[in-house]
Every structure is written in C-alpha cells, then in structure tokens.
Image (cartoon, helix red, strand yellow):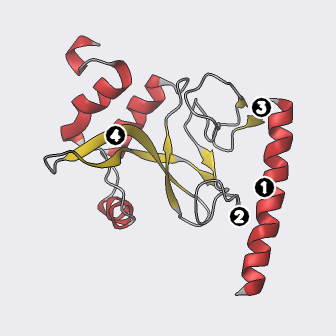
Amino acid sequence: MFAGKQMGKARGKENSKRIAAEKGKGWFVCCGCGKRVEFSESIGTAHRNHCPHCLSSKHLDKEFSGDRAADCGGCMPAVALSFKKEGADKYGRAREGELMLVHECSVCGKLSINRLAADDGETAIISLFNSSLLLPAEKKNKISEGGIDIAGPEEKEKVFIKLFGKGIGKV
C-alpha cells in the first residue's frame, strides 16, 4: 500500500512538472483532436482542463480533482453532459447547478465531470448532447452507477438555456 502511494506521488510530480511546462509555453496539444489549445485568463475557470474544440481532456487526477496522480494519462473524450448537483432548496427540491462535461478515460475507463469553459464551442457542446442521447444502455448504466446523471432528451431546453440564456425556439 505504501509503495502505491509513493508511486502516486511520483506520478503527481511528473504530471505537475509537465503541466507547469505547458503553462510556461502558454498552450498544449489536445490528445483528442491534435489542435493547439491556448491557456486563457478569461475562460470562466481557473484551470484549462479540456479542449474547447473537441472537449477532450487528459486523465491526470486519480482520487480527487487536482491530485495529478493518475497512472495512465489516457485521453478522456467527453461522452455526455450533466448538471452539477447543488443540494436542495429550502423546500427540499433539488437545486440544478451548472452544465458539466462527462469525460471517460479511453485507457482505464475512469469517469469524471468538468466545468464548461467560456470559450468551449457551442457546436461541439450541442453535438455532444445529441450524441449522448444515442449512447448504448451499458455505457449509460456505467455512468449512472458512477453517480452521474446524464442530461437526457427531456432536458434539451434546459441545456439550451444554460448555454445561450434562452430556449431552443429563441436561439
């Protein structure tokens, strides 16, 4: 067990060094589409963790966001959208949070959710939503068993409102 923690810390240091080098350059190359992705201060989140073009991420975190201890380093394409769980209001109704990306590692299968960034392509997000409606039942079940609720067809209007500030018929 101790050796595993040491390896995780070593991997975390390697990942942190690589990320620092990328930040120093001001960009990274996407593992999904191969495009150059610039870092920006105005993306609506403190850390650029996915490509704004294809929405893919890189598997860096193992136990929690920011630990940078993942061993595989696989590419994590976005597979669906979800709404962040924000607890309950004073009447006990679930509060709906921001729209999130659901990523799945192509190497180890780990699932994670990530915030959208202000410069993420709307076309890519809508395309992701539409393709997630066609996911096989096994994949949907795996995501659900991971504690993530996928945005479904009945939530299309909410997705558009979160993205554009208005419903489908007004975009």
Residue extending furthest toward the top: 170
Mark before the other along the chain sequence, 2 or 1? 1
Q: Residues within 10 Å of mark 4 (few under 14, many from 20)?
A: few
Q: CA distance from mark 2 to mark 3?
A: 21 Å
Rendered image: mark on residue 97? 4
> In x, y percent, where is residue 37?
70, 30
The residue singled out by tag 3 in the image is: 27
Mark before the other along the chain sequence, 1 or 3? 1
Front of the two marks 2 and 3: 2
Q: Is residue 115 left or right of residue 152?
A: right
Residue extending furthest toward the left: 91
The residue singled out by tag 1 in the image is: 15
The residue singled out by tag 2 in the image is: 69
Q: Is residue 11 left or right of residue 75?
A: right
Q: CA distance from mark 2 to mark 1?
A: 7 Å
Residue 131 location, quadrant:
top left
Query: Label 4 sits on what residue type?
Result: Gly
Taking 157 as reference, is 133 above or below it? below
